[in-house]
Amino acid sequence: MKDLTRGSIVSHILSMAPPIVVGMITIMICQLVDLYFVSGLGDAAVAGVAAAGNAGFLVNALMQMLGVGTVALVSHAVGRKDRDDANLVFNQAVVLSVLFGLLTLLGGFALARPYMRTIAADEATINAGTTYFLWFMPALALQFVTQVMAAALRATGIVRPSMLVQALAVIINIALAPVLITGWGTGYALGVAGAGLASTIAVFIGALMLFYYFRRLKRYVAFHPAQWRPQLRQWRRILNVGVPAGGEFVMIFIFMAAIYYVLRDLGPAAQAGFGIGTRVVGLIQMPALAVSLAAGPIVGQNFGAGNYERVRETFVKAALIATVVMIALTILAQLKPGLLLAGFSNDPETMSVALLFLKMISLNMVAQGLIFTCSSMFQGLGNTKPVLWSSATRVLTYSLPAIWLSTRPGFRIEYVWYLSNAATTLQAVQSLWLLRREFRKRLVPPKGKVAGPASPEPVVPLAREPA
């Protein structure tokens, strides 16, 4: 365990953020591997795998519920030096992850073909997507428990093991994909089924490695089968924090869907350019997102310990670091947008849309960095409802005007980006206001006490994190 209630806050953030960035990049690479190797099987295979993979976005919302709830409650317990509660929350989250995983598995098997029939255009795409889905579903189910294990480690200030496991899982996936999809070295090609199976094997090995880490190395939190009996009170604690965070994920999905809907009449190049631009923006925003994710456990531990001034200090420093990072990235996007977009498409019209998108949307990167930071603060404080409200506000202030404008004569694609920037800026302002209100309500020490450590109990000896 790493005690985040002491030492330099900036040092804690900067030491935790790089492994988080690496972990996020490896996840993004993992999502692209299957599509890359499936591309040789034809358009129907690519379309089927891509469409089936989109369902994983909604599954990620469920994973977010467990991950955010686990980080918040475990970090609070760590700050209070309440190891028993930290372990109880972790083990109950493991039980929930197994339950969610089983429901996801059963739901996927039952709904794979009906889901593909609602979104695919032809029978070949339906068959390819269904086949991939059925072989990929075990991977999605297993990711629930790996999400909980990684969240518990992050709550205790440890991020490196999860990053290493994710990186190794991606390497395994990359190695297995050509063997299983095209039959390299075996002569037995599984096609799209091999793509799903490669991901499932990689995730399974990653889950085993994290399980071994918890079982063989003594940590602040560990598996205790005696605590696996379902306790509804603990489930409510986890989901009260996690459900609004999952709802935020759904709001992002709706926001993106609204943009695609508005662009539908502007031609395929508009949607393709937006898709490319979104991937690039998501990639270059990762450092600021990693800073905010690193700040969450720091806030959680210090809030649990009653170090309220240190909570405020964490916000200020995380916001400053994220702002500096986003300013640098904004300058890069304004001066060298072509460099960031190089190699994504050979179609001039598509690249023109992507270039315009990147130059205009990059102007709100500072606002987006503040949104990331505020969201992480709310997660650390254990109240994620304000995040959901601000996300819903963004969806409403963008979607309704954008859909209305798209029906007006003379509608231009620039209007979509203007509205997006305005909605993001409004969300940033609202998030800051809501966080200020939350600080006033919750960062108030009891009468007669000064904000500081929650209890005089001796600190549990800390184990060093392996390199």
Image (spheres, rainbow, N blue to C red):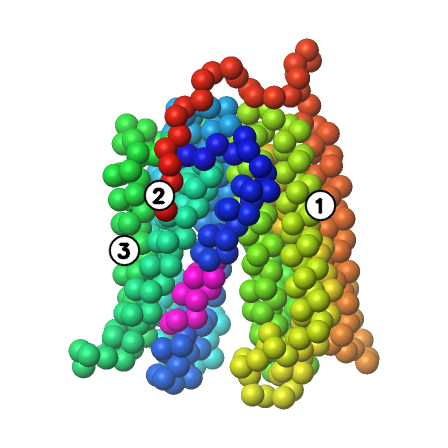
Task: Give the residue type at disc 1.
Answer: Ser
| Quarter location, residue 317 | top right
Q: CA–CA distance between discs 2 and 1?
A: 37 Å
Dot 2 alpha-carbon crowd within 10 angstroms: few under 14, some 14 to 19, many 20 or more: few
Residue at the spot 65% in from the left edge and 57% down from the top edge: 325
- Disc 2 residue type? Pro
- Relative to residue 148, is residue 84 depicted above or below? above
Residue ID for mark 2? 466
Q: Are marks 1 and 3 in contact (CB under 8 Å)?
A: no
- In percent of width and height, residue 207 lies at 31, 50
What is the total number of numbered labels drawn onto the structure image?
A: 3
Instruction: Indicate whether 347 appears above or below 334.
Output: below
Question: Residue 244 placed where, x, y %?
Answer: 57, 43
Q: What is the three-letter code of the residue carrying label 3? A: Ile
User: Closer to the camera: disc 1 or disc 3?
Assistant: 3
Is residue 12 found inside the magenta-colored segment of the image?
no
Give the numbered dot on residue 431.
1
| Position of residue 360 measured from the top left corner of the image (x, y, whole percent) | 73, 70
Q: Looking at the rendering, which quadrant does residue 59 occupy?
A: bottom left
Position of residue 165 measured from the top left corner of the image (x, y, whole percent) = 35, 53
- Check residue 205 in the rendering and tell me which mark sits there, or answer none: 3
Q: Residue at x 61, y 77 (%)?
A: 339
